[in-house]
Image (cartoon, rainbow, N blue to C red):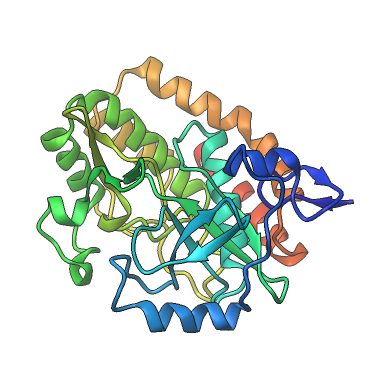
């Protein structure tokens, strides 16, 4: 039996029926991407000047072709983003997909996402764009670099306190969004995501209500980098590493965000109770045995610092 890279459940083919239906009820199959990982990276380079999506990680715009039962790469109008394997960093698609699944378990809203096979049987990560609606509709989204009047080159010149300030300034119901920020910040620390810079936070506007967007670009960078030096991309309480409960909970949750004790207790209880389920999901993920071991070790270490 195989395991479906979209639903993580056992299946006889490449994908389970439930995995396919989560993409579209009209899908009965999904063809492999007609590219190798290297060819996808070459496609990214060739299309870079035509796309609005930029970044270090290769990203390709795609649409789901129901009739052909496949993803088609497009220059414009794509409702999905596809991220292939990275030459210099191992298993990033598998890592991002798994970390996004953990986020959903942790009560964080994430877009529909999964893994898809290429012609060389390598896995690429795909995610549905949350800023697209209908046939050609767009939803207004701004990342926090834009809100803070920073650029791609200055996206690290900020702090988690500034992120909280931007929520207070721009969100319609800041108290609700600050609970989301606390949950996401704690999650990023626990899962070794040291790359949550300003462009990895966004607000989305629907019906004149401004909220935090669904989470994206969640990745355990600590196990990918050879010599990780930081634990958060943006300083919190004046530092970027050696975080303890007093920094993330006492200072950020209670003092800076001003969250009620019952809310913080509920979030902490959900994380603590979810640790075992995270480990179970990690064991059936598409990461290699070596990467699973590293991820397990990091989770155990980080949890021990928040829940001594």
Can you name the residue that lies furthest to the front here? 67
| Position above or below: 10 against 81 | above
Q: Position of residue 163 (x, y in %)?
A: 22, 45
Left or right of 258 on screen, residue 268: right
> Who is closer to the viewer here, 74 or 177?
74
Q: Is residue 304 visible?
A: no
Which quadrant does the C terminus fall into? Answer: top right
> Who is closer to the viewer here, 14 or 180?
14
Q: Position of residue 296 (x, y in %)?
A: 68, 52
Left or right of 136 on screen, residue 124: right
Q: Which residue is depicted at the point 59% across and 52% down?
A: 67
Q: Position of residue 119 (x, y in %)?
A: 69, 74
Q: Quarter-wise, where is residue 177 in the image?
A: top left
Q: Quarter-wise, where is residue 155 in the image?
A: bottom left
Q: How many marks?
A: 0
Q: Which residue is depicted at the point 48% across and 84% down?
A: 42
Can you name the residue that lies furthest to the top here? 262
Q: Which residue is depicted at the point 46% across and 26% down?
A: 267
| Position above or below: 147 against 206 | below
Q: Is residue 9 visible?
A: yes
Q: Which residue is depicted at the point 66% across and 70% down?
A: 118
Left or right of 194 on screen, residue 3: right
Q: Position of residue 198 (x, y in %)?
A: 25, 56
């Amino acid at each position: 039996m195989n395991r479906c890279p979209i639903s993580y459940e056992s299946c006889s083919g490449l994908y389970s029926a439930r995995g396919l239906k989560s993409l579209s009820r009209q899908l009965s199959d999904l063809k492999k991407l007609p590219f190798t990982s290297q060819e996808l990276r070459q496609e990214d380079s060739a299309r870079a000047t035509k796309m609005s999506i930029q970044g270090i990680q290769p990203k390709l715009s795609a649409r789901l072709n129901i009739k052909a039962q496949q993803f088609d790469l497009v220059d414009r109008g794509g409702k999905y983003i596809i991220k292939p394997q990275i030459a210099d960093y191992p298993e990033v698609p598998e890592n991002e997909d798994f970390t996004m699944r953990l986020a959903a378990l942790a009560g964080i809203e994430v877009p529909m996402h999964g893994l898809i096979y290429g012609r060389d049987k390598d896995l690429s990560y795909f995610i549905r764009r949350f800023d697209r609606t209908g046939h050609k509709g767009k939803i207004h989204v701004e990342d926090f670099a834009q809100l803070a009047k920073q650029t791609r080159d200055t996206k690290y010149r900020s702090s988690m306190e500034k992120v909280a300030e931007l929520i207070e300034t721009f969100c319609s119901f800041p108290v609700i969004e600050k609970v989301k920020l606390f949950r996401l910040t704690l999650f990023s620390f626990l899962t070794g995501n040291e790359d949550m810079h300003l462009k990895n936070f966004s607000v989305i506007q629907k019906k004149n209500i401004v909220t935090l967007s669904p989470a994206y670009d969640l990745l355990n960078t600590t196990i990918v980098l050879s010599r990780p030096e930081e634990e958060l991309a943006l300083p919190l309480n004046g530092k970027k590493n050696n975080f303890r409960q007093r920094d993330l909970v006492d200072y950020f949750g209670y003092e800076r965000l001003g969250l009620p004790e019952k809310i913080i207790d509920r979030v902490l209880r959900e994380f603590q109770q979810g640790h075992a389920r995270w480990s179970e999901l990690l064991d059936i993920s598409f990461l290699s045995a070596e990467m699973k071991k590293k991820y397990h070790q990091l989770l155990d270490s980080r949890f021990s610092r928040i829940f001594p």
